[in-house]
Image (spheres, helix red, strand yellow):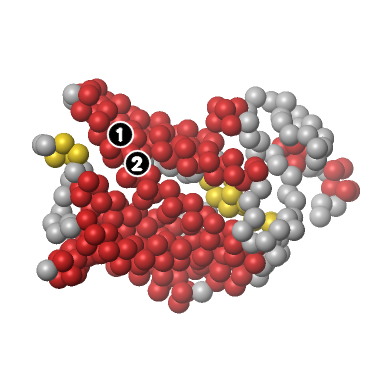
Amino acid sequence: MRDPRASILDKDPFDEINEGVRPFNPNKRQTTVRDAPLFQRFWEISMNQPVAHHRGNLWHFSKTEKQHLLLATGAFSIAIAFMTVGGIFGLMSGDLVTGIVEMLVHTPIFIFALAPAFVFHEIGHKIIAKYYGCWAEFRADPQGLQTGILISAILGFIFMSPGAVMVSGMVSKKQNGHIAIAGPLVNLFLFLIGIPLGIILFVLMGIVEPLSPLTGSGLSIKGVGYMAVTWWLGVNAFLGLFNMIPFGPLDGLKVKGWSEEYFWLTISIFGILVFSQFSGYTMSIVLSISNMIIA
């Protein structure tokens, strides 16, 4: 708590943050006097939401949190659509009709792989934080989302800061490490469960070799299935490894501060998974097992 006598010497930094914000009324939607960024105006969300502990279960999501999750997922979808065709310049440099068809086919596949990896990663943080008695809700970063969409539209690849789970409460270093490692562990679970589910899908669809969703004869359903499994595994492996980097606000720094042993174990596991996936080793195993079952 800030000592009230401190105002004699310096200005409360929160005064500037809250300047122009109307008094909180629980029966009225909160807005700010100042103009909000583009995504905030569109979704009518405010970054100045009051912290209120929920009395519900661990799987509780406030209306504001649902809006922010929807905003981040929607922005991801737009960025993915641009990425599938190499950005606006990639779309305009080739056949426009072909580029649009690629967007329509590839975008749902990428969303299928990316959305669960991102959303459940954040939910993992949220559930463990609430388990330790903290207030925890996801908040999107409108500026990060706008920047990510522009990068994807211009350069044709995704580099986005969608937001994070905001946590308020007193926790120990160990508990903070548990909250941080929960997200990557969710990605590890999604990766591992993706292998047997991928094998089952390949067997049911009769996939025995690498295929592309778009072929010379048109859309290949088997190719859609193969690409969906490939990206599911790749995205979860990469997202887990990226978040374990011990830098800035990433999970790795908090995990390392709690336990060097668990940090190196977790980041090593994800390093192996990323190498095995992007070298094609994991998909070779999935195809080999599928072929044995089909035969």
Residue 89 visible in rendering: yes
- In the displayed structure, 119 sits above or below 256; it is above
Which mark, residue 108? 2
Residue 273 visible in rendering: no
> Closer to the camera, 97 or 280?
97
**Residue name at image x 28 percent, y 55 percent:** 229
Percent coordinates x, y for residue 120 in the rendering: 49, 56
Residue at disc 1, secondary structure:
helix
With 72 as the anchor, is 152 left or right in this view?
A: left
With 24 as the anchor, is 295 left or right in this view?
A: left
Q: Which residue is mark 1?
A: 104
**Residue 234 lies in what quarter of the image?**
bottom left
**Residue name at image x 59 percent, y 65 percent:** 128
Q: CA distance from mark 2 to mark 1?
A: 7 Å
Q: Residue furthest bottom?
A: 261
**Residue name at image x 20 percent, y 50 percent:** 222
Percent coordinates x, y for residue 43 in the rendering: 58, 32
With 281 as the anchor, is 73 left or right in this view?
A: right
